[in-house]
Image: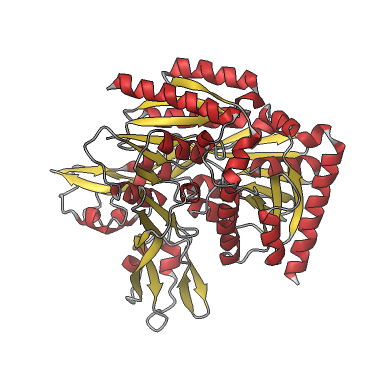
Amino acid sequence: MKKILILSGKGGTGKTTVAASLIEYLNSKTIADCDVDAPNLHLLLKVKNPVEKDFIGSKKALIDVDKCISCGLCAEKCRFDAIHSFGSSYKVDEISCEGCTMCSLVCPAGAVSFYDDKSGTLQKYTAPYDFSTACLKLGRGNSGKLVSEVKRNMVIKNTEEYAVLDGSPGIGCPVIASISGVDWVLLVAEPTLSGFSDLKRIVSTAKAFDLNMALCVNKSDINMKITNEIIDYCKDEGVYYLGLIPYDKAVLKALKSCKLIINVPSEAGNALRNVFKEFKQVLENEN
Amino acid sequence: MKIAVLSGKGGTGKTFVSVNLVNSTENTDYYDCDVEEPNGDLFFQSKLIQELPVKVLLPSFDKEKCNACHECVDACSFNALALIGKDMLLFESICHSCGVCSFVCKQKAISEVPKQTGVIKIGKAGDSKVVTGKLNMGEAIGVPVISGVLDLMDEDRNSIIDCPPGSACSVVESTQKADYCLIVAEPTSFGFHNFKMVEQLARVLKKPFAVVVNKAESKNNIVSSYCKKNKIKVLDTFLFNRKIAQDNSRGEICTSVDDKMKARFISLLDNINDDWQRSLK
């Protein structure tokens, strides 16, 4: 089973729209949404009632006010600015605390204990897809760890089938966690100065991993000059160029009624089909 | 006043709103905290004044002193250390620079050395300061770069903080010092879903907030009706406009050429200010 991850660098270029249609086109049954900060794929695939499991991302410190002697050592040594004086004692800010345990190591009164912090919820849908995803608790770190857990929850079989993973924007920890171990990255680019700049950053980041990259340009007619620059850039970087998808109001309409754009007869739908046809050929030639 | 501009979903127009707020008003500076993908300066093309490296501390091991006792490996809460035979191995990208390993080492074999993880660029565009945080590629943790950017905020001026997408720790860090949150929402099912996540975040952080709807097809949309029902202020609604999208793609700032847009952004900042003042009472 080959794993295909959808990425873009910049947000809002159309990753999820492309991912949902690719799942349909390849008839993938093993899928994941790695954008745990802002998951959306489930909305388009109309799946319901996932099996949920708490995700314990880290420990958090707790100061016992009765034992605390207000020496302030914990606050001084905390590198995350997570401990502040509070009345006659000290208090841990649960959002800033990273659970490193420095505070308890320096506390002369043994006033610090730790509790498991639920930093997200893992979700698994079983029908009609084997669909693994999660939702990070607001403001939590550890999104990389949660993404790794989402991937571990996928059942990767030894078949010819393709597994499709929707990624998150950026180049940081959730993205790095999502890239490791995949076979292909499908990049959804946007022809704007911002989109092109972000694309270069994600391509450089992904290059450190041993994988193949392919690319399509979404909303390509918004700026043909940058679209052409992106196509040239692909050639220079050894990224397979698959084709263009024009800006089309039908995409928004399809999204509104929770339809997949490749199932809607439209300019963008047809263009996306051609992109996937090209992609499938590239995938098959590689085998 | 310090205003954090956030959205949940990517690509809703955080940078569009931030850049135009700064461009159309006096006494306002721009701080790009989307350090994984900073884009604001593509619009400002500011004149570079200064570049500051962002460094974090990483443990370094003295082989002579290390007796392979394993204590640092056990103490690390992030599983960033491993002992392979007699050699210490550090997984740099997951190290949180907490200092626990060097603290627990009885042999004093661990020292902490600075390592650059990103850079902060300070530029000038017109009367505005343009501060951009940029995380090095391959680095996982952007929080130190974000906090470095925010340390440069000027108390006497208005600060617009362009936040990263999502609702994780990097967004919290970016909004930490803000007086007010401005949420840019896109009225699609995705945009709406993620908007509600950020709305919750603003409530958890106890920040006053309001909404700007962007890329709408009409003034009445799923975001506006939700806001009406929940008594959330919508300060302006920008309809999708192909011309704006095209100008934006070239890195043009619309308030530089369009006086009507400029007037809208000036009143947007006024409205934010009024709403913030009210929230203080």
Task: Give the quadrant of residue B101.
Answer: bottom left
Task: Give the quadrant of residue B278.
Answer: bottom right
Horizontal and vertical percent for residue A97?
43, 62
Q: Dividing the image into 4 quarters, which one contains the C terminus of chain B?
A: bottom right
**Image point (78%, 58%), residue name:** B273
Horizontal and vertical percent for residue B74?
22, 57
Q: Is residue A27 left or right of residue A41?
A: left
Horizontal and vertical percent for residue A220?
60, 25
| Callout count | 0
**Image point (43%, 53%), residue name:** A47
In the rendered image, is residue A204 in sight?
yes
In the rendered image, is residue A171 in sight?
no
Q: Nearer the viewer, residue B214 or B83?
A: B214
Task: Give the quadrant of residue B24.
Answer: top right
**Image point (37%, 52%), residue name:** A146
Q: Nearer the viewer, residue A283 or A38?
A: A283
- The type of colouring in the image is secondary structure
Q: Farthest residue toward the left?
A: B85
Q: Is residue B71 left or right of residue A144?
A: left
Q: Is residue A135 left or right of residue A14?
A: left
A168 over A122 or under it: above or below: above
Q: Nearer the viewer, residue A52 or B35?
A: A52
